[in-house]
Amino acid sequence: MAKRQWLIAGGLAVVIIAWFGLKNPIYKLSLSDTPITAVPMDYSLVESWAAYPDARPPGAWETPWGVDIFLIGPPTGLAAAPGIVNALSEEQREAFDKSITELTRALPRGLPIYAPRYHSPSAFHPKGEYADEVGDALNSALENYIDNDNRHRAILLAVDERALPYAENITAQVSSGDLANRFAGRIVFGESDNRQAPVNCNPSLENSCEQQVPMQPAANPSSFFLPQLPGHIVSRTVTEPAGVAETIRVQSQQVSNWLDENAPKPAEPLGSIQEVAIVPIRRPGEVEADSD
């Protein structure tokens, strides 16, 4: 009986050792090797955004000067065949929405949040791979937001540290040119030295254009037994969400006050122009000429 128990225990040990040694290649073989692609996102559609205001915020011609949060969540890091994973698939949406929900816990209520969805690289790719493709998509989201939603409001950029490789061009855009005075700084969720911090922002921030927010991994004991792929993304939680939200609120208020006191108010745009038929003017006694 004891010998049989030893054999069973030995067999289980072999299986466990084999699993930890082979789980990653076995999992990869279970998926198709055909590279996957996804149709470019249309950011004029609300479903292309994980967070989007229910009502249109007032333009900067009103007081106080409004501040928006442009939030870039982490890639989902889900396992799939090599390539880019469709952001609108159910699995992707659920994973991305979970990350966005966690990050918004640390953002102040009352500030409009715009969080674009984007096609994430498969977990089989190292972190930062496909930076150009993902960065181009996020640039498109920012352009759509500025053209259609911003209305000269200030912009606070909030980025998950794991999305920084895709967000450097966005940081450069909002911290330069005409946007620099309206740039309310960058908040980075997670602590990382592998970044290029912005150097220009609203003067009220005194060149402290970036703040880092500590995060900690969410408890998930079963993850030890799952395949560990290069682009795997670990769920994280914000350490002190209420305190972070208050700090961001004060920072946003500071920028808003500076803009109200120092920046010229933009003119409120006119409504759409309608064509009006010109009525002919006749002298007394004149009648409309008969048509041929």
Image: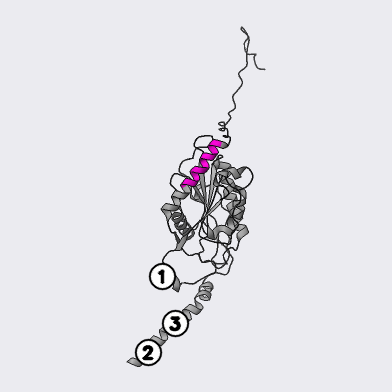
Question: CB of mark 2 within 8 Å of CB of mark 1?
Answer: no
Q: Is residue 252 visible?
A: yes
Which mark sits nearer the N-terminus, 2 or 1? 2
Residue 147 or 165: which is nearer the viewer?
A: 165
**Which residue is labeled 1 in the image?**
221
Instruction: Name the image quarter holding residue 289.
Output: top right
**SS state under label 2:** helix
> Could you say which disc has been placed on residue 63 in the image?
none
Q: Is residue 85 visible?
A: no
Question: Mark 3: which amino acid?
Answer: Val
Q: Position of residue 38 (x, y in %)?
A: 57, 58
Whole-number angstrom distance, CA of label 2 to CA of label 1:
28 Å
Q: Nearer the viewer, mark 2 or mark 1?
A: 1
Q: Nearer the viewer, mark 1 or mark 3?
A: 1
**Which residue is labeled 2 in the image?**
6
**Which residue is labeled 3 in the image?**
15
Classed neighbour count for the residue bearing mark 2: other residues with Cα under 10 Å, few (<14), some (14–19), many (≥20): few
**SS state under label 1:** helix
Q: Which residues are magenta?
A: 249-261
Q: Position of residue 94 (x, y in %)?
A: 45, 58
Q: Is residue 253 magenta?
A: yes
Quarter of the picture containing the C terminus is top right
